[in-house]
Amino acid sequence: MFIRSACRALSLFLLLVLGFVGELRAAKVPLSGAPAWVQQIPVKLTTQVKPKEVSAGYHTLLRDAQYDLATQTEYQHQAYVVFSEDGLQEISEIRVDYDPNYQQLAFHNVRIWRDGKPIDKTAGAGYKVIQREKELEKHIYNEKLTAVIILEDVRLNDVLEYAFSLRGWNPIFNNKFCNTHYLQSYDPIDELFISIRSTPDHPLYIKSENTQVKPTTQTAGDNKFFTWHLKNLPAFSMDSDAPSWYDPYPCVYVSEFKNWGEIVAWAQPLFDVKEPLSTALLEEVNRIKKEHGSSEGRLAAATRFVQDKIRYLGMENGISGYKPFPPAQIMKQRFGDCKDKSLLLATMLRQMDIAAYPALVNTNYQDQVKNWQPTFYAFNHCIVVAELFGKQVWIDPTISLQRGLADSISTPDYKEALVLKKGNQQFTRLTVPHNSKIKITESYTFKDIGGPANLLVETEYFGYEADMQRSRFAANTTKQIEKDYLNYYANQFPGIAIERELEFTDDEEDNKFTTLEEYTIEDLWTKDESADDNILRANFYPQVLRDRLVMPSTIIRKMPIGLNYPLHMEQTINLHMPEDWPVNPAVNTIENKSFFYRSHIQYHPKSNLITITYKYKNLRDYVPVAEAKDYIKKQKLILNDLGYQLTNNLDAAKRIASFSFNWLMLAVLLAALMAGSFGAYKLYWAYDPPQLTYEPTGMPIGGWLILVIIGLGLTPLRIISHIITSDSYFNLSLWQEITNVASISYNPLLAFSLVFEIIGNIGTFIYSILIIALFINRRTSLPRLITFFYSGNLAFILLDVALVSQLHLENNSLGAEIISPLVACLIWIPYFNISERVKETFVNRLSAPETEEELQAEKENEAIAGY
């Protein structure tokens, strides 16, 4: 029920004293014959079921349950056959729970069948009565008793048969009857008999679920019998990791309630406050009203008071299991269970002019309950709904230390609630904020490769996750939590040690809880035992995320898969490297209708930072059967994608670090230089188009052309500087590593890209010198050739980026490298083709037309060329 308590030590003590030891009394259990209305069902002593077909070492031969509504009596008759020592241990003790506040227990017979003959144990059995308080660990006291029979001389293959009856119903039910009967179990059952004897005063409504079996009906005078008699029921197995609300077992709901409005009409008066409010309660209400002027502030303050100041403790004997104590009493004793705390909070809010009502929910079956035949057994929890500015705000008063604004309180999504508001006839859908999130940042800093590393972990919790952590830190010492965190990481890094004490901050207004850890890891790098000793590896894994993922053990499914919901996680691993590091950047997205997952690997060359980010979010709380196969397949893909490894070859690093000149690349450079120079020479002398204008003299270089010539002048200097300072083009050790098939750094595409880059740079270098010469001489060929220069430079950069993307070498400056030539193309290409100044500046040729005929021919060529 999502319960928190501030008195853990006291509760543990009580658990030891009352829960384990209990109160052992002398036997006061009456022995009698079965009631006259009971239909006697004989036990079949043989079975076709094999020992391997049952799970507990014993097999159910008979399960007989009969009810008489007129006398408020329940009759139970059971029979089991013992298959193994485990089963012998289990059934040699008969236990029956009952509430002495309104029930009377009577045993009718206890016998052992051995070799087909009965051994009567009814009178000679040792009856004991124990008060165990089985829900003590949940801080619930119900005062139920357990009648215990410890049988002597029970042997393998014996059949144990016993029968008892319980008379009396809880008076809180107003003589109404409700029950649920399952028609199949996890293990096989030889015979199932269920009979209900009703009267005209107790009309029954019956609803079947997951079965077509209908009861037989029989009338005897004013009595009507409803009977289910089934034989040889096979085992009904469950798939693993099914949702908590999923109940596939065939069952029948029997109830005297026709609709849920009748349940509200029964339950709502139990929460009516008839007693006057105490002075202490009114003083607390007035204090909150005085300190908080807004309804939102008052709602949040009242919620925190009930959650944190009224501890959880349930006294649920008899009618107290369903009827809350008055608010004045709860305020005085400063404890209560879910219904007590809900009534107190709703009462306080009404005193502040905020409409509020208790609401019944089921924490396990959630929205499935509304499909049942209405019953008072449908609910196991009580919360509050408040109406604030036309919106519903749902609050669970049993969760302590919740923070945040009133409309962002992270109430669990119980899905459907039956609001105890007079006249209500139906369930209400909860609208709760799904603002829970965990954000983890693990930052590793390396001084050198192979040495120790520093690990800094910052974890941010939001919404419900923040509430959980706040409660954890309140219930445990920081030192204990620090120890738990250390041992968590020690599973991956045994040589880890705390560098500084655990720190945490709590932003209550935004409901954000943050922890900060710092460690030193001595053994992060390990040698690869499967390879030679010169290979070091370091592994990094998002273990926190992995622990939250659901991979069911039942792969071939007939049932849905339950998911953690809401679940929203982001885990980032930062690797601060001491040197340049080859990285394969990648983005991987895996998703379906139930979840979304993305991993992203990045490299930041300026800071030598590798970042691996994992994002995961469940989109609903279950996976339908039809989608289970796809879900499991994609979850396996996620598990394979998790984790990152750094690998360092010490020999390769030494060889790369010791520079030796690559004469072959120098030959490539010289060949490109010679070929480019020859092409530029031919282009300078061969391409001599007519002038764009025939003014006697052209204009000098000026205006915007000054910027162009400056940029052109810097181009060859930049290229030469890049070639000389680069450690990639002429490093023979590097080339041996990337071209050697046996090397861990083998990468033929990288070798091709380096050759492509140096040839392209040499071509750009020579062509830029040609353009500068033509520019200074104001040649008529300049406008057309400079257009090719700008567009060719852009094409070269784009091809280089494409190669880098294929190599998976992250470079954050690639975007800037593309933008610069792109802008140059967009500005200067139109300028050199339409500017009048360009036409009047670049007018010189190697030779000019001498005759009128030559001049006329050139004009015709101009028209054809489009000048």
Image (cartoon, grey):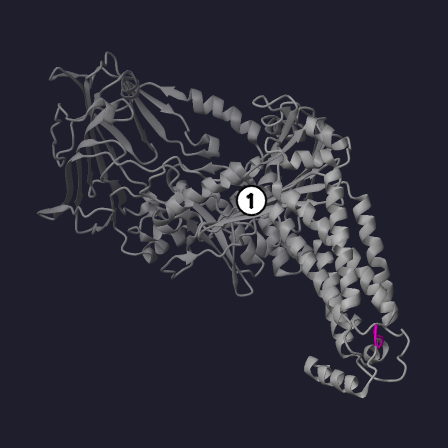
Query: What's the residue at 66%, 42% (across, down)?
Result: 751
Question: Is there any visible trace of residue 530 in the rendered image?
Answer: yes
Answer above or below: position of 124 versus 731: above
Amino acid at dot 1: Met
Front-most of 319 and 688? 688
Answer above or below: position of 37 versus 326: above
Q: Position of residue 176 (x, y in %)?
A: 27, 47
Q: Position of residue 553 (x, y in %)?
A: 39, 35
The residue that mark 1 highlights is: 331
Relative horizontal placement of residue 808, taking residue 713 as reference (left or right): left
Q: Is residue 845 magenta?
A: yes
Front-most of 733 and 501? 733
> Which quadrant of the figure has residue 771?
bottom right
Q: Secondary structure at mark 1?
A: helix
Query: What's the residue at 59%, 33% (across, down)?
Result: 741
Residue extent of the magenta highlight: 843-847
Q: Residue furthest left?
A: 220
Characterize the magenta stretch by its predominant secondary structure: loop
Give neighbour class at mark 1: few <14, some 14-19, many 20+ (Cα, 10 Å). many
Relative horizontal placement of residue 245, taking residue 697 as reference (left or right): left
Q: Is residue 819 magenta?
A: no
> Which quadrant of the figure has residue 520?
top right
Query: What's the residue at 62%, 33% (across, down)?
Result: 740
Which quadrant, please, contains the C terminus? bottom right
Q: Position of residue 11 (x, y in %)?
A: 52, 29
Relative horizontal placement of residue 474, taking residue 759 as reference (left or right): left
Front-most of 631 and 782? 782
Question: Is there any visible trace of residue 365 in the rendered image?
Answer: no
Q: Position of residue 509 (x, y in %)?
A: 66, 51
Front-most of 258 and 415? 415
